[in-house]
Image (cartoon, rainbow, N blue to C red):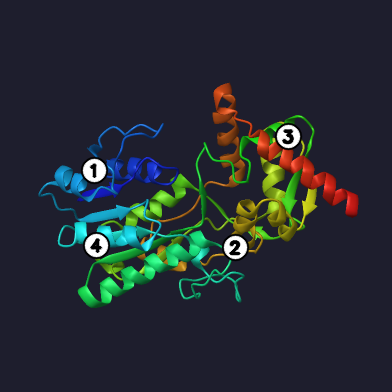
């Protein structure tokens, strides 16, 4: 197969690029070549900015692809550009959406692909929903060959799963208090990018997947208290948790609050039956305990990676101080 990834060196896509090459796929990456993650050996770089349609046309020239995967489209206007560029150039267009598009809070668990798409709290999710609607219309009216894929919270060794990143690890190692939203008991799913890759690569060139949508996640369920505790153990520290309601966090930091109110404060359990039917060898096997160890090994290997956000650090101190005053 000849496959094009628009992006291909991100947190999620980097593992998919590597696995695609390992499975003998002729892989092309269309990106600006500015990621700190290198172009993987065996991939062909088409250097251009996807937002520059004429530049994209020049580097693609007359090429066509069995599958095109759009990793970095977030708004309907970006989808419109893709429809224009890739019409008649691919037999399958995979759009990377987000599991945050599902009804929030969910009326019923587990979440399946039949769960309504509705997130009134987070603009990011609403834009992804709008992208999906436009692609559905293109499929119905023009038979544009779409497949929609919705990752949930997917990570690699560079990505800590909480607001503030390494700042939180630094606080734990300095025996400072940290914030966990709510009472920390809501259930969450963290998916290692190498596990996600098995599902995504299995959909490439799969004619049965045309017109279908899938989420691809781990089946491991963890509370946020457990997530912070596992990470603290991997960091050789203790998680001194202060539970703060998501609504209060949102008053101090709307961006942080949106990601909680529109996503992380609600328990999410996913039924992965559909992806397992279409990709029988898909199985998520990497527990977060192993993933957390990989994360800390990566950060500890180079002090330059241990970036502390002083604004977030001071904000956490302020939220804790004011919250504990009125409790």
Q: CA distance from mark 3 to mark 4?
A: 46 Å
Of residue 58 and residue 207, the one placed in the foreground of this image is 58
Q: Is residue 86 left or right of residue 202?
A: left
Per the image, label 2 sits on a secondary structure element best described as helix
**Which residue matches tag 4?**
83
Q: CA distance from mark 1 to mark 3?
A: 41 Å
Per the image, label 1 sits on a secondary structure element best described as strand
**Mark 1 or 3, which is nearer the eye?**
3
Tell me if mark 2 has few (under 14), some (14-19) or many (20+) residues whose alpha carbon lies within 10 angstroms of its own.
Answer: many
Q: CA distance from mark 3 to mark 2?
A: 26 Å
Q: Residue at x 40, y 57 (%)?
A: 74
Of residue 312 and residue 114, the one placed in the foreground of this image is 312
**Which residue matches tag 3?**
171
Pointer 1 or 3: first along the chain: 1
Pointer 2 or 4: first along the chain: 4
Q: CA distance from mark 4 to mark 1?
A: 19 Å
Rendered position, 196 above or below 310: below
Which quarter of the image is occupied by the C terminus?
bottom right
Pointer 3 or 2: first along the chain: 3
**Which residue matches tag 2?**
262
């Amino acid at each position: 197969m000849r496959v094009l990834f628009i992006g291909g060196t991100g947190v999620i896509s980097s593992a998919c690029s590597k696995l695609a090459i390992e499975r003998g796929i002729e892989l092309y990456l269309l990106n600006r070549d500015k990621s700190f993650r290198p172009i993987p050996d065996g991939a062909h770089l088409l250097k251009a900015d996807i937002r520059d349609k004429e530049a994209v046309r020049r580097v693609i020239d007359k090429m066509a692809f069995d599958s095109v995967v759009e990793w970095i489209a977030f708004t309907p206007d970006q989808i419109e550009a893709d429809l224009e560029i890739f019409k008649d150039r691919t037999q399958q267009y995979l759009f990377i959406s987000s599991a945050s598009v599902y009804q929030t809070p969910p009326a019923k668990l587990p979440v399946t692909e039949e769960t309504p798409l509705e997130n009134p709290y987070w603009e990011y999710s609403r834009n992804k929903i709008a992208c999906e609607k436009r692609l559905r219309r293109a499929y119905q009216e023009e038979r544009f060959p779409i497949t929609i894929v919705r990752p949930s919270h997917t990570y690699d060794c560079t990505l800590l799963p909480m607001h503030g990143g390494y700042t939180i690890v630094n606080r734990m190692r300095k025996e400072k208090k940290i914030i966990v939203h709510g009472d920390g008991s809501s259930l969450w799913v963290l998916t290692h990018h190498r596990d996600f890759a098995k599902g995504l690569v299995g959909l490439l060139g799969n004619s049965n997947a045309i017109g279908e949508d899938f989420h691809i996640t781990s089946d491991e369920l963890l509370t946020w208290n457990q997530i912070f505790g596992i990470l603290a153990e991997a960091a050789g520290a203790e998680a001194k948790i202060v539970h703060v309601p998501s609504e209060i966090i949102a008053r101090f930091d709307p961006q942080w609050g949106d990601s909680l109110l529109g996503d992380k404060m609600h328990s999410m359990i996913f039924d992965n039956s559909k992806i397992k039917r279409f990709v029988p060898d898909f199985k998520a096997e990497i527990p977060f305990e192993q993933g957390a160890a990989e994360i800390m090994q990566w950060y500890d290997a180079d002090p330059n990676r241990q970036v502390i956000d002083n604004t977030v650090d001071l904000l956490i101190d302020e939220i804790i101080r004011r919250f504990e005053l009125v409790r």
